[in-house]
Structure formats: C-alpha cells, structure tokens
Amino acid sequence: MRDPMPGPLGGEADPNTWDFSADHGPLPNPVGHTFPLLTHDADNEWRLIGTGFYISSDGLFVTARHVIEDVFQDGEQVSPLAIFHLRSESELFGPQEYLLRPIMQCWLGDSADIALGVAADAVNNLTREPLSHWSWPLSWAVPPVGASVATYAFPNHAITRTDHGQTIAFRPDLYPGTIQQVGDFRDLRVMPFPYMQVDFRIHGAASGGPIVGPDGAVTGVNCTEYAPDGPGFGTQIRCLQDAFLNNGLLCGEAQPGQVTFAELVYAGIITARHYVPNAIPPLSGHLVQLNMPITARGPSVELGMAF
C-alpha cells in the first residue's frame, strides 16, 4: 500500500488563487527554477536539507549558507550534495523524471546567511544539447513594510523505504504573506546582515527558498523561523553583492578566472533589477569546492501539486 501524499504544513496559499501556468498566477512552472537540495549518508539514505533556486538559465543558483554548511564539518565536506532537478524547460527529460545534478562550487557569505552556487553542466546524451531551464530575476529594491511577498519551497515531503529503495514524495507549496520589518542589521548573533521579517511560514527545508516581491522578482532568501509560529526571516538578496566565483569565462575572454557578481549582472547572465553595486556596507565571503560524488541509488519520486 502506497503512503499518502503529505498533507499541508500550514500557511499555504489557497490553491484556487494560483497555478503552474506560465500565463496565469504568480508563478511560472515553479519546479523549473526552484528545487530541493538533497544529501545522503554512508548508508545511502537520502535526506532533504533545503531549497534552492536558479538565477541563470545554465546553472547559477542561490540558497541559504546554512544549507550548504549542512554537508561540511570543520571545513571539510562530509557528505555529497545534489540539486534534485525535477523538470527542464528544454524538455531534455520528462516531467516525471529528474536529474541528480552535482554542485561544483559555492560562495558562502561570512556574515550573511546566503550562498551563490554553480551547478554542474548537463547535456543530452544523444543530441549533446545543453540543459537550459527557467530562472528567477532578482531585485535590489527592498519591499516596504506591508508589501505582499511570498515564497515557493519544498519543506513538505515524506521519505519512505521499500524493498526496491527509497521513495520521496514532494508537495511543493506557495506561502504568501507581507513584509513586517526590514533593516541593514538586526542583531549580532542571528542576523548581523541586511534582513527582512515576514509573516508567512518558513517551515524546515524551506530554508534557501526565494522570497518574491510585488514585482515578481526575488528580493530575499528564506533564512529562519522562530518557533513555533514565526515570525520568519530572510536575507536580503543584496547580500550577494560581494559574491564571486572561480573558473568563470565571460564573453570575449580567452582564459577562465575569478568572476564577480557585478560582472555576471553586467554580462546579462543574471537579471538584477534596480541593481546598485555596494549599496550596503561591504560583506565578506569565501568559496568552497564540492567534490564528494553521489554514490547512492537515486530515489523514486512522487510530486504532489497543490491543486
């Protein structure tokens, strides 16, 4: 007997007010650009640790720093990390199939709970066509107090084991709300960086998911929720301003090298509306390499839509 799809966690949007169509509702096919992040242990047991979202069509993504740090201990990677890529705009694989996409490197904010990552290149085995997918635009404009915002994320899931392996049932949902407070600094211990306080739920593995502002662009990243019922907090997307990546190759360059976030924006690889570089005090960060291979058998997947 198959286990039922997970029920609502609380705080979801009315499913009658949105859908997965590219032409209707606030979100264009969310599973194309927002995804679960998974790891597995030495016994090959899979675990969902957070949500991430693409910000370019070829694999640049954003999540929370603490999600990436989940697979590190004392600066060393101790378990693999993969993007659970559920479907593709280029239709290289069907809607019920998935790709366990490795992650190559991540810039982690030293103070801000935010990370910029690079997913491994993927191509069709037959045609050699590169994988392309939807991505979120970013916004440097901070929504005012009272503005409507929402997150789309993967906190609601169930992992079961059978004789044939593991099955993960996902129920992605939209969680709407409003901005309660914004600032460049909240406290020294939890949020010593530009933040936003929201009144929607940020359940567990929603960490790292996008906070979408009134203009349909991402203005923040899910960070934490105070138990048991909130409020929730997000890192302002502006905290990416000092991010950089290694081994990048911009148009016109002959050799790969270090590429800054500003260069990615100016090259048109990332869309950042109202972009103003260094609009907040400089933040520091560092790169980590992710080179631990995925060795566990991929789980079966069930995807439950919210309508």
Image (cartoon, rainbow, N blue to C red):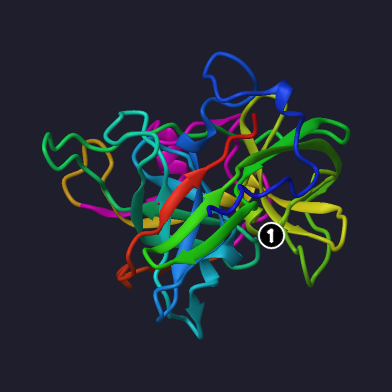
Q: Quadrant of the C terminus?
A: top right
Residue 254 on image: x %, y %: 16, 45
Q: Which residue is found at the position 82% from the left and 30% from the top? A: 147
Within 10 Å of disc 1 (Cα), the crowding (few <14, some 14-19, many 20+) is some
Q: Is residue 159 above or below residue 270?
A: below
Question: Which one is in front, 252 or 151?
Answer: 151
Name the residue beneath numbered marker 1: 204
Q: Is residue 89 above or below residue 262?
A: above
Residue placed furthest toward the top: 23
* Magenta stretch bounds: 256-284
Residue 176 shown left or right of residue 210 in the figure: right
Mark yes or no: residue 304 visible.
Answer: yes
Q: Which residue is found at the position 28% from the left and 41% from the top? A: 250
Residue placed furthest toward the front: 1
Is 238 part of what is drawn in magenta?
A: no
Quarter of the image where one finds residue 113: bottom right
Question: Which one is in front, 174 or 136?
Answer: 174
Residue 155 on image: x %, y %: 64, 53
Residue type for callout 1: Gly
